[in-house]
Amino acid sequence: MEKKENKGGKKKSILMILLAFGPAILLFLVSLGKCSNNYQQLPVFSEIPSYKFIGANGKEITEKTQAGYITIFTTIQVSCPTSCAIDLFKFNMGLYQEYRKDQKEFKDVKILSIVTDEQGNPVDNIDEIIYTLSDMVVGYDSTIWNLVTGDPAQVYNVENDKGVNLYMQENQEAFAQKPYLSVLLLADKKNQLRYVGLGNQEGYIRDFKQHIALLRQEYKKQNEKK
């Protein structure tokens, strides 16, 4: 009886993803990100193109400044930062707080949230959303979780081996009809895309966190060999 319920739950989850993101975006996530945790080493999907953002401190952020860091890319919207594309509360509690509280261990992990308007367009002024995060997020530290301005297409304009382009996908059920706004990207220390996941539900964020752990384990093994 229990097995039947588990199978039903899995089918329901798959159906919900299909309804929310459509076949094309699901294909993208399956091809680029939804790999099994049986991987001992995360695959390298592609190199993220060169990018340039301006951080909350006014400094320029590029793939060169991020070299040597594991970087998590998200988007965040000025109009409703807590629940538009990603679930800010669950992202904060599920990822950021752990990395913040143990910087001795997680100093190699950085978060870049690209600030956009409700349509995914770049914005110039991020003072208000900086204040919002500082007020809502315990111990908010821009050196760990930086809000940046710039075009999100710089990093989200990627496609899988089926020719499905993440940035170009549209779906009526997604926020602003643009599924990429809810997507988290995981880049390694060489600016290579290693995983793609969703940031709008607790289960997805937990899954993403597991893949960060796999990537960090890869670096630990490399250091042990040295």
Image: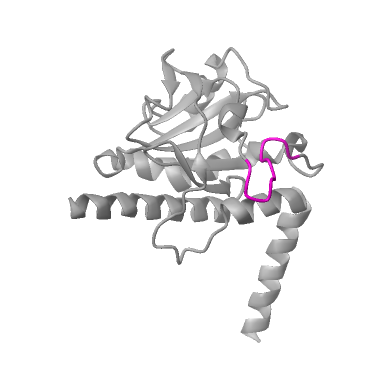
Q: Residue at x 40, y 57 (%)?
A: 41
Q: How many marks?
A: 0
Q: Residue 167 magenta-drawn?
A: yes
* Secondary structure mostly seen in the magenta stretch: loop
- Of residues 117 and 170, which is closer to you in this image? 170
| Position of residue 165 in the picture relative to residue 185 (left or right) | right
Q: Residue at x 55, y 22 (%)?
A: 129
Where is residue 136 shown, x and y percent of the image? 50, 31
Q: Residue at x 30, y 37 (%)?
A: 107
**Above/below status of 80 relative to 40:** above
Q: Residue 204 magenta-drawn?
A: no
Where is residue 192 shown, x and y percent of the image? 45, 40
Most extreme residue toward the left is 226
Most extreme residue toward the bottom is 1
Render colour scheme: one colour
**Above/below status of 168 relative to 78:** below
Where is residue 128 shown, x and y percent of the image? 56, 17
| Position of residue 73 in the picture relative to residue 4 (left or right) | left
| Position of residue 101 in the picture relative to residue 179 (left or right) | left
Quadrant, the N terminus: bottom right
Residue stretch rendered in magenta on the structure? 159-169
- Of residues 24 and 141, which is closer to you in this image? 24
- Of residues 191 and 90, which is closer to you in this image? 191
Where is residue 196 shown, x and y percent of the image? 55, 47
